[in-house]
Image (tube, rainbow, N blue to C red):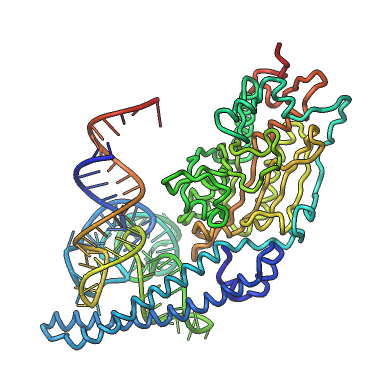
Amino acid sequence: MLSRDLLRDSPERVSELLELRGESPSAVARWGELDGQRRSTLTELEALKRQRNEASKAIGELKREGKDAEAQIAEVAELKRRIPELESEATAIETELRDLELRLPNLPHESVPHGADESANRVERLIGEPRAFDFEPQAHWDLGPALGILDFERAAKITGARFTAYFDLGARLERSLINFMLDLHTSEHGYRETLPPFIVNDDALIGTGQLPKFGDDLFKLEGHRYYLVPTAEVPLTNLFREEILDEAELPMRLTAFTPCFRAEAGSHGKDVRGLIRQHQFNKVELVHLTTPEQSYEALEQLTSHAERVLELLELPYRVVTLSTGDMGVSAAKTYDLEVWLPGQDAYREISSCSNCEAYQARRANLRFRPSEGGKPRFLHTLNGSGLAIGRTLVAVLENHQQSDGSVVIPEVLRPYMGAERIELHS
RNA sequence: GGAGGGGUGGCAGAGUGGUCGAAUGCACCGGUCUUGAAAACCGGCGUCGGUUUACCCCGACCGCGGGUUCGAAUCCCGCCCCCUCCGCCA
């Protein structure tokens, strides 16, 4: 949600910035109309309520003195008719205004490149050298089944397309990656390990911005207001919703492993092979709650924490700043980490690190009390993958594969794996 | 799933139809006293919205939503959450 003060004071500027994100300028104009209606209705309504309150008080005094109050009661009768009318009018306006506000995306930070889609993204840096293979590297969808560690067919049998079953060192590798990442972030990067529910309610999803606009991407539990989490960003960011934190508690850094569930509406035909795009995947998430003054420094830190995972796993990657047209609705600025996948001869997203500024905090009513006192302020929220586990497993398999079809396990994972290689059986 | 109890300001905890946004205690902030601190005493101390340069003023909020009433923290209905016991279950 955007600040109402900003929408009132600079509608033309907000409108311009939202257009960069593909929003129609009429939305801001409509907001202005509704806001004006809301305030004039409220002013009228509150004046009537004041009259009613004063009359009621007079009635109370008269009755206590044993006097007749019929005249005052009659006076209130007309108010009793008009107040509910105006109230429902005010509610209707407020509802429409609120719904409109919930659908407006965040404003892009000034450092974000302008553009309609990913072609306008800006590559910030390339880290690591893609390995020179002296054989034709395989894609993980061939490697995994050949090694007997990934099974797409059997998963389809018990569930359907875009699900995968892992066996043996494949399952072990997934679990090792989760533990390795949680250990790294908690022991070296100062995160609190969290284990949230994997099912969340609609309020939480509104808080982080998935609802009301993107319900089709979610798995909803029939007969409930519950949804499977699409990312741990939702439970983590909403944990302290409706609360006022002490500034001394900030910045708060939270990390969690959760499975993520996505309906992948509209992605038919994209990445149909392999692990890249699944209805269920694992992820270790990073969330920061910070003061507004610190949030951009925090974005650099959070991104570096995700990058550290790639470095330790000896995976080449690049850092990309998403353009205005490619960012998620809640973000003011997003860095994507894209890992090199030799089997596909491409860099693919493995982490997305965003500063949402106060956009989610306003929706979730997430505030802090400044140390020097004064009114509560909205804090800034950030989130990023640290990393997506399934895609990391893909990157490990494809980058560390050998000519004989085996895979060498990176040094840092060996204590978790209890193995140095994944060999072809039989 | 069944039965009972309960949700009030940062915390504890009064308040059962009329100056109640709400006693009191603790915590916190400021002051007096003190060499300093503590204690004691005095004062202050919720959030959101409307109006406003500002002060003020006004409206709303006692889990959430509706209802009764001139008037609801207080009465009625529905829902949510927490606690205890029973059942079931990993």
- In the image: residue B37, left or right of residue A165: left
Q: Looking at this view, is A260 or A385 the one in front?
A: A260
Percent across and percent down for residue A406 are: 76, 19
Quadrant in which the C terminus of chain A is drawn: top right
Count of labels shown? 0
Closer-to-camera residue (A313/B38): A313
Q: Nearer the viewer, residue B80 or A312?
A: B80
Would you place residue A426 above or below residue A284 in this image?
above
Q: Position of residue A309 (x, y in %)?
A: 69, 36
> Who is closer to the viewer here, A260 or A302?
A260
Quarter holding the N terminus of chain A?
A: bottom right
Quadrant of the rendered image containing residue A317? top right
**Which residue shows up at 70% across the image and 49% down it?**
A300
Up the image or down, A108 lies above or below A143; here it is: below
Residue A60 in picture, x, y percent from top left: 19, 79
Q: Residue A198 placed where, x, y %?
A: 50, 40
Instruction: Farthest residue to the bottom: give it.
Output: A71
Residue A58 sits above or below residue A11 on the image: below
Q: Is A73 on the left or on the right of A355, as rendered?
A: left
Left or right: A346 as drawn, with respect to A385: right
Q: Is residue A371 above or below residue A135?
A: below
Residue at figure coordinates x 73%, y 29% from the top left:
A140
The residue depicted at 65 percent of the width and 63 percent of the height is A107
